[in-house]
Image (cartoon, rainbow, N blue to C red):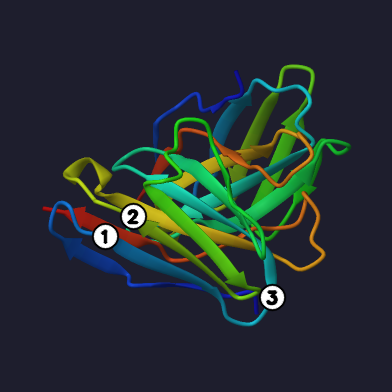
Amino acid sequence: GESVGLHLPTLSVQEGDNSIINCAYSNSASDYFIWYKQESGKGPQFIIDIRSNMDKRQGQRVTVLLNKTVKHLSLQIAATQPGDSAVYFCAENPNTGGFKTIFGAGTRLFVKA
Amino acid sequence: GAVVSQHPSWVICKSGTSVKIECRSLDFQATTMFWYRQFPKQSLMLMATSNEGSKATYEQGVEKDKFLINHASLTLSTLTVTSAHPEDSSFYICSAIGVGGSSTDTQYFGPGTRLTVL
């Protein structure tokens, strides 16, 4: 079935270091991928997205890499800050003709000061 | 821009009662809204897709008679949890896509509603 999963459930990094959060997806037909950040008790916040015709996209301090060959996504956060501490979800649109978005399991990022 | 609100932010109810949760797009019109449920330390699970002026589309395993969805206007969708039981206690989150949006358009999420059923 369709699923999006993450390699690591938790990640702890030192403030100032770079963070890499990984995600595997199983639906090769998915054409759109999104990373969300969710702080405790709040709704998901859009971070960055990437379409399947791209393999890299950069934002402010964040980069998403897409490897369609192995169905793998990663989110790189540069110079991680305490405010980056949250749960990060990758999500995919399985390209079934609608807007359906499937969320991965999530990775909790801890930033140590 | 693109703000989605939910009301209430939290609610506590007795088992057997019904609870209505509102999702509003504040500064844009949304033909499509989504309702998700999130249990503690788990991911978001899509419950249903709400389309303005038509019936909602429910995901497999979601009881449509228990989770009533109404999307009567381009800025409001409601989720009513009928005959709530303790196992319905969860964090309910809505999201919205603007009018004319495509499947690759960003979904804007609400802040969530914490439901606790006693």
Of residues B84 and B28, which is closer to you in this image? B84
Q: Position of residue B33 (x, y in %)?
A: 60, 59
Location of residue B101 (image quadrant) = bottom right
Residue under label 3, please give it: B29
Q: Earlier in the sequence, mark 1 or mark 3?
A: 1
Q: Residue at x 78, y 50 (%)?
A: B104
Q: Earlier in the sequence, mark 1 or mark 2?
A: 1
The Cα–Cα distance between marks 1 and 3, rounded to whole angstroms, is 28 Å
Read off the chain for label 2: B
Where, quadrant-wise, is the N terminus of chain A in this rendering?
Answer: top right
Q: Position of residue A98 (x, y in %)?
A: 74, 44
The Cα–Cα distance between marks 1 and 2, rounded to whole angstroms, is 5 Å
Q: Earlier in the sequence, mark 3 or mark 2?
A: 3
Q: Nearer the viewer, mark 3 or mark 2?
A: 2
- Disc on res. B81: 2
Residue under label 1, please give it: B18
Of residues B72 and A3, which is closer to you in this image? B72
The reply to whether the C-beta atoms of the residues labelled 1 and 2 are less than 8 Å apart is: yes
Q: Position of residue A27 (x, y in %)?
A: 70, 23
Element at badge 2? strand
**Which residue in the rendered view is the most extreme toward the right?**
A53
Location of residue A9 (image quadrant) = top left
Asked whether the viewer can see residue A84, the reply is no
- The amino acid type found where label 2 is placed reads Val
Q: Is residue B86 above or below residue B24?
A: above
Asked whether the viewer can see residue B29, the reply is yes
Read off the chain for label 1: B
Report how many numbered discs are placed on residues in the image. Answer: 3
Q: Residue at x 79, y 26 (%)?
A: A29
Q: Residue at x 33, y 54 (%)?
A: B81
- The amino acid type found where label 3 is placed reads Gln
Element at badge 1? loop
